[in-house]
Image: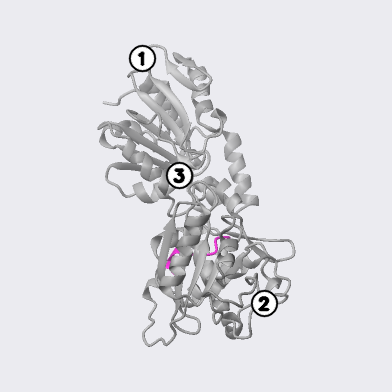
């Protein structure tokens, strides 16, 4: 016997699974490109349930500066179109008969995750789930405690390892659906025409925008997951080099962390990670003290510190007579005439040198946190042909976390050019070197890489 569903639940066949199997799963992950009907499908189901049961429903996303950035408008349009018995208020929607409330929130406020309003929720819907950070996910999910509560994710993946996708795609309590405009019989002719134009005129963008393929497949990501994983097989037996260097990325914003990476030189071009340290307190004395402690414990041969991050750390270390090297990622390096023919700034040059080492199999095993961070590093080309790493600010706008782990590793590699300079307290201390011209013994100059 076929159950006849109300018009409100007219959904593509693939999305009807969330209705048929609603009681069988706690989590529902619907992913794919534009026009697949993911958000429409979830909104229709939630409105149907809200009209039959008294529920607490929250619709959230990583950042929501205003109600217009939420799925509020989708609900409002469906309510008007289907003449549903809801009161649509400025910030929430209430069913007049059941009393169900639908609220909307951004999880990240002023740099921290806010879970207020999630206690006792029956249904949580996270749209644009590709923008949810691992940190946010780790806080939100344990908050949904009701035994019969449901969590819906709708997304068009940025990367293969987007935190939500990575966490839920293979769980036996999660229903995973991939759907695109080709699977949606309700997709308008106008939208289909847009997809066809994109396929014809922008073939590189079409797979992500319309088919939901992760951006990691695009050629403007600097690192590939397989190459990073292959680093685990690097053999350093018989290596006679032992010098150690450190790169320190100093955080300035919200959830960003300060990260220190120590590399040990294991050959002319071979390095392995010796130690990683992370801290969340972004203040001058805490960060300076940690850096001094690391320099003392590991007897480092060279240190590079993010001079554009937490203000005052480099100055304080200078006052303490430590010979550190300031890293200014945006510096164009007038002395690097040859090196800057291909790279727009210091940061871009040294990220590409890191990519070269990894591609050659000369970097030891990389931890998963750093792999995840490296996989977000993207570059673009300027009109003069030079490459430039896309800024943290732009990456944040795309929903990515700050690549703190990756930046620290890159800066540690940058520090290798200064091996031979003492970092201990020195009476003859001079001003820290800023983007100094590489010495003749620079490891990449020896290898022929510029």
Label number found at residue 132? 3
* Residue 385 rendering spot, x and y as whole percentages: 71, 66
Circle 2 residue: 437
Foreground label between 3 and 1? 3
Q: Secondary structure at mark 2?
A: loop
Snapshot colouring = one colour
Is there a contact, CB below 8 Å, between mark 2 and mark 3?
no
Q: Earlier in the sequence, mark 2 or mark 3?
A: 3
* Residue 422 rendering spot, x and y as whole percentages: 54, 78
Image quadrant containing the N terminus: top left
Circle 1 residue: 98
How far is mark 2 from mark 3, CA to CA? 41 Å
* Residue 52 rendering spot, x and y as whole percentages: 34, 18
- The question of residue 224 being in magenta is answered with yes
Foreground label between 2 and 3? 2
Q: Identify the magenta region.
A: 220-228
């Amino acid at each position: 016997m076929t159950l006849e569903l109300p018009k409100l639940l007219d959904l593509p066949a693939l999305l009807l699974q969330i209705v048929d199997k609603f009681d069988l799963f706690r989590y529902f992950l619907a992913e794919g490109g534009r026009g697949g009907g993911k958000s429409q499908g979830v909104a229709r189901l939630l409105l149907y349930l809200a009209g039959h049961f008294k529920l607490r429903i929250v619709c959230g996303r990583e950042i929501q500066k205003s109600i217009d950035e939420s799925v509020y408008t989708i609900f409002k349009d469906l309510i008007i179109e289907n003449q549903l018995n809801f009161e649509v208020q400025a910030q929430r929607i209430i069913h007049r008969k059941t009393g169900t409330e639908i609220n909307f929130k951004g999880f990240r406020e002023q740099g921290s995750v806010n879970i207020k309003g999630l206690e006792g929720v029956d249904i949580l819907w996270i749209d644009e789930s590709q923008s949810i950070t691992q940190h946010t996910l780790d806080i939100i999910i344990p908050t949904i405690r009701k035994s019969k509560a449901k969590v819906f994710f709708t997304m068009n993946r940025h990367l293969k390892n987007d935190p939500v996708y990575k966490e839920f795609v293979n769980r036996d309590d999660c229903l995973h659906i991939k759907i695109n405009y080709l699977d949606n019989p309700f997709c308008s002719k106008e939208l289909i025409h847009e997809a066809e134009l994109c396929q014809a005129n922008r073939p590189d963008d079409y797979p992500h925008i319309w088919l939901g393929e992760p951006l990691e497949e695009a050629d403007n990501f600097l690192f590939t997951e397989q190459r990073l994983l292959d680093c685990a097989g690097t053999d350093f037996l018989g290596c006679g080099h032992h010098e150690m260097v450190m790169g320190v990325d100093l955080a300035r914003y919200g959830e960003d962390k300060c990260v220190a990476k120590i590399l040990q030189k294991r050959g002319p071009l071979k390095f392995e990670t010796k130690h990683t340290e992370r801290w969340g307190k972004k203040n001058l004395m805490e960060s300076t003290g940690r850096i001094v402690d690391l320099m003392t414990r590991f007897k480092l041969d060279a240190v590079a510190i993010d001079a554009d991050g937490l203000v005052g750390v480099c100055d304080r270390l200078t006052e303490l007579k430590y010979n550190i090297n300031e890293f200014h990622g945006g510096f164009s390096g007038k002395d690097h005439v040859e090196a800057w023919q291909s790279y727009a700034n210091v940061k871009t040059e040294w990220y590409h040198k890191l990519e070269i080492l990894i591609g050659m199999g000369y970097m030891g095993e990389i931890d998963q946190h750093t792999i995840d961070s490296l996989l977000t590093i993207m570059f673009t080309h300027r009109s003069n042909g030079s490459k430039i790493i896309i800024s943290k600010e732009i990456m944040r706008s795309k929903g990515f976390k700050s690549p703190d782990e990756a930046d620290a590793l890159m800066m540690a590699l940058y520090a290798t050019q200064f091996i031979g300079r003492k970092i201990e307290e020195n009476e003859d201390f001079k001003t820290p070197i800023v983007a100094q011209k590489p010495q003749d013994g620079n490891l990449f100059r020896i290898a022929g890489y510029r």
